[in-house]
Image (cartoon, rainbow, N blue to C red):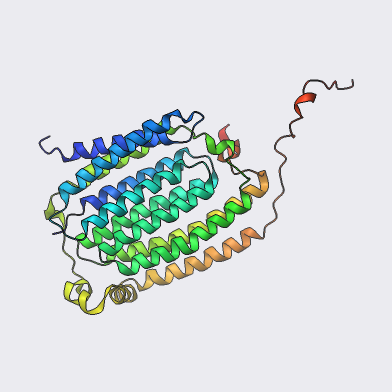
Amino acid sequence: MSNPWPLMVYVTFALGGLAIYFLMPRTDRSTRGAGAIFGVAALAAAMVLCASRFLGTEGGNVFFYLSAVVAVASAVKVITHEKPVYSALYFVLTVLAIAPLLIIQHAEFLAVALVIIYAGAILVTYVFVIMLAQQGGASIYDRRARQPFVAVFGGFFTMALIAGQMTVLPEEHVVQGTLASASAERATELGNTAMIGGVMMTDYLVAFEIAGVLLLVAMVGAIAMSRKRVPTEVVRASAKPPGQIGREVQPF
Amino acid sequence: MNDIAPYIILGALLFAIGVVGFLSRRNLIVIFLSTELMLQGVVVNLVAMGRLHGQLNGQIFALFLFVIAAVEAGLALGLVVLLFRRKGTLDADRWSSMWG
């Protein structure tokens, strides 16, 4: 293979996978240091990769690096933190770091919608449920991950292959847009929000209506589900206090 | 032409982290948080590819993705509350009665 780019992508993803594997919650915490070292190495490799592909100083490179590092680091904390409340809060940080990336790409409406919908609405729902259902402190099932090596291998192997091969596609495959409303002069004249509204209300009108119906159905379903009474299963008899284990003799 | 390789790599990293969380965490709430993480990676990729092609379709798709994410969060969290009421725990391994 003459082009070293895919190989570099694979190495980056391998480093990232090792970092995640060592950082996943487990009973001994001694692997955290190795995970942090691998994580810093993977982030550095990813930054070198990105720096080799940016043309000139287009589009606020400094902000891309800042936001991307914050987004990836907090995403790692989301899946490795032992307490679900902290996972949810780190997910807010990920969303807030991705919003600048959308602004850099001139998707201002989408960035604002992302912050309002995710950080405002969805995360509040998550935190409510966590407050409702989570007992105090980290439970045993939060402190031990299930099969972290298989999960890391599956996820990172697949995504490394896809990312490595997608980023070396020849540029003749790119078809320039035919939507007149997306042209550059209209963008400066109208702004991103008006252009999205125009495309949404003409080309995607049916899909827009279906999305509204879907939201209505989901609301009805959520209300119906939350009003349903479920029987509580007694899964296990409560454990005896330590002094009484083995001392009881059942009468014949 | 803008080169969108950095955005594709970032989206792939976020998606891979979400996959790992989805497969290996045992808390139901964290599992659904991981799916939201995967959707974030997809949003980054959609917007970057829409910009590459000079179209707004990517951003429109991302907006519909927000709709799906909101629907999924509402329904999935309702299910999580139901499951918690039944077993009194958020451990996904407690629902493995179909292992045979």
Task: Give percent across and percent down for residue A200.
Answer: 33, 73
Residue found farthest to the left: A2
Q: Residue at x 63, y 59 (%)?
A: A226
Q: How many marks?
A: 0
Q: Residue at x 24, y 37 (%)?
A: A10
Q: Is residue A144 left or right of residue A167?
A: right
Task: Give percent across and percent down for residue A146.
Answer: 49, 34
Looking at the picture, tell me which residue is in the foreground, B45 or A82: A82
Q: Residue at x 28, y 60 (%)?
A: B47
- Could you tell me which quadrant the C terminus of chain A lies in? top right
Looking at the picture, tell me which residue is in the foreground, A178 or A64: A64
| Displayed quadrant of residue A225 | bottom right
Task: Give percent across and percent down for residue A205.
Answer: 36, 73
Looking at the picture, tell me which residue is in the foreground, A23 or A114: A23
Query: Where A164 sits versus A245, above or below?
Result: below
Residue found farthest to the bottom: A189
Q: Is residue A163 left or right of residue A208?
A: left
Q: Is residue A248 left or right of residue A205?
A: right
| Displayed quadrant of residue A97 | bottom left
Q: Residue at x 57, y 62 (%)?
A: A221
- Could you tell me which quadrant the N terminus of chain A lies in? top left
Asked if residue B89 shows in the view, the reply is yes
Asked if residue A150 shows in the view, the reply is no
Task: Give percent across and percent down for residue B6.
Answer: 23, 50
Query: Where A207 sits versus A130, above or below?
Result: below
